[in-house]
């Protein structure tokens, strides 16, 4: 699988950054849907599929899924996740609308 997007986060008191990746959408065997995988390094250590009826929709859903996983994380709410040395605010991509109380920019 080919990575089509990657984003790096800072984790307070950690030596290494946290990386999130979105993989190129691939058609499903049914021929009617596509899947783009979202993967986040530890401490999230997760890999989730995002599906759609087209490759574009799968990418959009993957970005929304990444938003939910990151902005909804307790580490973000506790101000331990950030970017460019700033924690608890804008992570560099929009937040899913359900997290507008938590994050600065909506989808």
Image: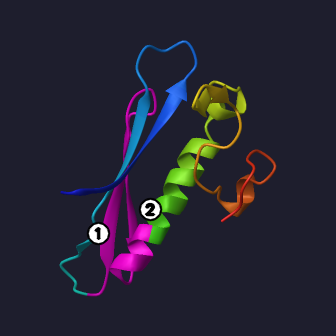
Image point (58%, 18%), residue name: 12
Residue 29, position in %: x, y? 18, 78
Q: For residue 89, what is the image quadrant? A: top right
Q: Is residue 44 magenta?
A: yes
Q: Badges 1 and 2: C-beta atoms under 8 Å apart?
A: yes
Of the image marks 1 and 2, the number of the one nearer the N terminus: 1
Display colour scheme = rainbow
- Magenta residue span: 32-59
Image point (34%, 78%), residue name: 55
State the residue in front, 39 or 28.
39
- Describe the element under mark 2 as helix, strand or loop: helix
Residue 31, position in %: x, y? 22, 86
Q: Is residue 22 magenta?
A: no
- Describe the element under mark 1 as helix, strand or loop: loop
State the residue in front, 2 or 51.
2
Q: Which residue is mark 2?
A: 62
Query: CA gap, disc 1 to disc 2?
Result: 9 Å
Q: For residue 53, what is the image quadrant? A: bottom left
Mark identifier at residue 25: 1
Most extreme residue toward the front is: 84
């Amino acid at each position: 699988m080919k990575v089509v997007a990657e984003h790096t986060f800072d984790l307070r008191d950690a030596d290494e950054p946290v990386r999130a990746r979105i993989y190129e959408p691939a058609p499903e065997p049914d021929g009617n849907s596509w899947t783009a995988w979202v993967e986040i390094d530890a401490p999230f250590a997760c890999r989730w599929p995002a599906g759609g009826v087209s490759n574009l929709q799968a990418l959009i859903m993957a970005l929304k899924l990444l938003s939910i996983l990151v902005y909804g994380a307790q580490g973000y709410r506790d101000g331990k996740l950030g970017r460019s040395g700033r924690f608890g605010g804008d992570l560099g991509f929009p937040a899913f609308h359900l997290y507008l109380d938590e994050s600065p920019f909506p989808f």
